Image (cartoon, rainbow, N blue to C red):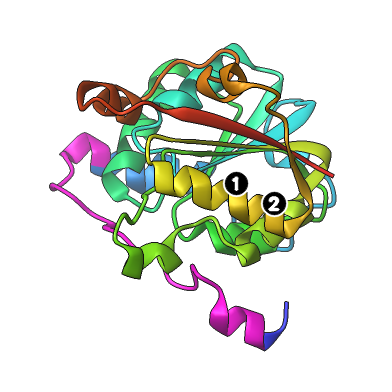
Amino acid sequence: MTEAERRTRSTEAFFGRRKGKPLRDQQVERMETLLPALKIDLASPAPVDIKSLFPLAVDKVRLEIGFGGGEHLVHRARTNPETGFIGVEPFVNSMAKLLAVVEAEGLKNIRVHDDDATQLLDWLPDGSIDQIDLLYPDPWPKKKHWKRRFVSQVNLQRFHRVLKPGGLFCFASDIDTYLNWTLQHCSRHGGFQWTARNAADWRTPFSGWPGTRYEAKAKREGRASAYLTFVRS
């Protein structure tokens, strides 16, 4: 990546809150003890085989950017024990919620990054990830803030580099402008093929979808969600 690209990338800085209400003592303890054990060390070179990040054998690796309370990430880790999951979430309170479940259930196939996802994407080896999930990302609804949206040509290039050929990029949102934005950006990039053949394909949730709190909120407020799947060429 050139210096010009670094200066112009849309997510050079993380936009959003990092902290909410104060953590309880037990949450603080997990952040101080469990988080370091699960957190990926970007100061060290990435392993040739990214699957070696996990303490048990996995046959594929899946990345979720912005996992919120972790409900989807935990569900996928429970139901796919043969897959290694990397979850990215800079919001401290959300990370604390995930750690509580990981500890309670003894999940071994989750690793995390608690900062800007672009840092992790730039660290990952080429062709190391089988699937990237970007689910209900912050839509930045005001047009003047659209440049802050995570989907951009620069970030799609990051996705394209780290995904294996045939790997999947899955995007879910209830915001029409962001859905159109993502379709247009993926089309313009040229390295991602939208898999939909009819309306049911993008109106139907992903296979094994557990739902999320954001999806539930959208339904309560009368907004329909869409589920876009792209294949990396």
Q: Is residue 52 above or below residue 182?
A: above
Task: Identify the magenta region.
Answer: 4-27
Magenta stretch prevailing secondary structure: loop
Image side of residue 4 versus residue 31, left or right: right
Of 32 and 148, nearer the camera is 148
Which residue is rendered at x = 69% and y = 42% of the image? Answer: 53
**In this view of the protein, can residue 83 be seen by the observer?**
yes
Pointers 1 and 2 in contact (CB under 8 A)? yes
> In the rendering, at what x and y percent does residue 38 appear?
52, 42
Q: Which mark is residue 149?
A: none
Image side of residue 222 versus residue 134, left or right: left
Of 201 and 80, nearer the camera is 201
Which residue is rendered at x = 16% and y = 39% of the image? Answer: 24
**In this view of the protein, can residue 42 be seen by the observer?**
no
Which residue is rendered at x = 84% and y = 51% of the image? Answer: 48
Q: CA distance from mark 1 to mark 2?
A: 6 Å
Q: Which residue is mark 2?
A: 187
Q: Which residue is mark 1?
A: 183
Q: Is residue 113 above or below residue 76?
A: below
Indicate whether residue 15 is drawn in magenta. yes
> In the rendering, at what x and y percent does residue 77 appear?
56, 22
Indicate whether residue 31 is drawn in magenta. no
Q: Secondary structure at mark 2?
A: helix
Q: Residues within 10 Å of mark 1 (few under 14, many from 20)?
A: some
> In the rendering, at what x and y percent does residue 27 appear?
25, 38
Image side of residue 224 versus residue 188, left or right: left
> In the rendering, at what x and y percent does residue 174 appear?
38, 35
Which amino acid, mark 1? Answer: Leu
Which residue is rendered at x = 80% and y = 26% of the image? Answer: 59
Which amino acid, mark 2? Answer: Ser
- Quadrant (top left, top right, bottom left, bottom right) of the N terminus: bottom right
Of 128 and 81, nearer the camera is 128
